[in-house]
Image (cartoon, grey):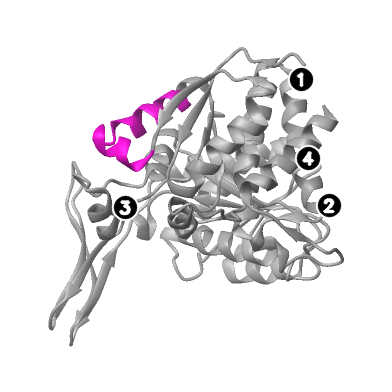
Amino acid sequence: MEKIRMTTPLVEMDGDEMTRVLWKMIKDELILPFVALKAEYYDLGLPHRDETRDQVTMDAALANKKYGVSVKCATITPNAQRMDEYHLHEMWKSPNGTIRAVLDGTVFRAPIMIDCIKPVVKNWEKPITIARHAYGDIYKATELRVPDEGKAQLLYTPKNGQPQTLDIYNFECPGVLQGQFNKDTSIESFARSCFAYALDQKQDLWFGAKDTISKQYDGEFKAVFQRIYDAEYKAKFEAAGITYFYSLIDDIVARVIRSKGGFIWACKNYDGDVMSDMVSTAFGSLAMMTSVLVSPDGKYEYEAAHGTVTRHYYRWQKGEKTSTNPIATIFAWSGALKKRGELDGLLELVSFGEKLEAASLQTLTDGIMTKDLCNLAEGIHPVEVDSESFIKAIRARLEATL
């Protein structure tokens, strides 16, 4: 068959360890035989990031900003152990954090559902998408170990004007102190990304914070969302037949558990970090979770929600076959190809992405699974296969569909 042609490149960001191995398998078996791939390639593997002093990450992020669509492999955020293991010049920052900052984006994560794996929460019938504000709060906080008695104060010195000082606490003993921040511009981008994505998906949007306790900090999130919704999105939401709903985060959690799913749940940074893992685990597996970074001006970065699967990589290095689940990485590729096709008006490319997803899910429905899913499957007799065999089984179904 003639390969599907592309008109605009997508940005390809390669990664680390076992996911890098799967990345090549997926390209060789499921993409390159069918698509004349037009991609601008960046190697975000840790050795190359170290060689370029992490400039390659910035270059990839700027390319994403230029072309509008990227697909990214999982990458290592190094700690002290990785510094020694990879002989790094520096403990480089998270590539995801760098890309999010350049795109000013919001991360949307949603579970991939199949009939034979039921959510732990029995009334969940549709996916719940977590929208995480990936900026500021405790992730950029300044911390201090208080060694003894003393007064802690919050000081703000304006560019023009008088300094403002607030007492935090008079310590009568040692303790800990933390100062965190966020910016109106980032909160506004978060809100617009959430509203735009809800319209794109035609799903209700829920948002929860704790403005009753954090009247200034969380109160600002609530106020910004409401202001932007009323001014820019209310009429569009009403025309689309969807709703925006705000409540306290504890009330939202209770409502989520009682719901049937099928909505987008916007979360502040820490809430999104925790709740995305809760939702993915309750639906089955982090390896069955899509992740897309969306900027307010409509740039997209697709990736898997999980890490580099280090333990499997060490086994693979010894020549062992591993049963590592590639579904989330496959869906990163299919999502990026569909979006590229949608933006360029290439219906054949959109259709290919849809058929790749359908072939992947059909393989699972037929009971051919990686080890992580076998114990979760109900009503079928799953057959455990290694990663390579699983990807080849998907290819067979994809070829039959095409």
Q: Which quadrant holds residue 151?
A: bottom left
Residue underneath mark 3 = 78
Q: What amino acid type is highlighted by mark number 1?
A: Leu
Circles 1 and 2: CB distance less than 8 Å? no
Give percent across and percent down for residue 145: 19, 73
Disc nearer the start of the sequence (2/3): 3
Dot 3 surroundings within 10 Å: few (below 14), some, or many (20 or more)?
some
Question: Nearer the N terminus, badge 1 or badge 2?
Answer: 1
Q: Helix, strand or loop at disc 2?
A: loop
Tell me the distance, in whole angstroms, between the alpha carbons under discs 3 and 1. Answer: 40 Å
Disc 4 marks which residue?
A: 359
Q: Which kind of residue does numbered mark 3 sit on?
A: Pro
Q: Secondary structure at mark 1?
A: helix
User: What is the count of numbered marks?
Assistant: 4
User: Do the CB atoms of the residues marked 3 and 4 lie less than 8 Å apart?
Assistant: no
Q: Position of residue 318 (x, y in %)?
A: 44, 54
- Residue designated by label 2: 366
The residue labelled by disc 1 is 347
Structural distance between the alpha carbons of marks 3 and 4: 35 Å
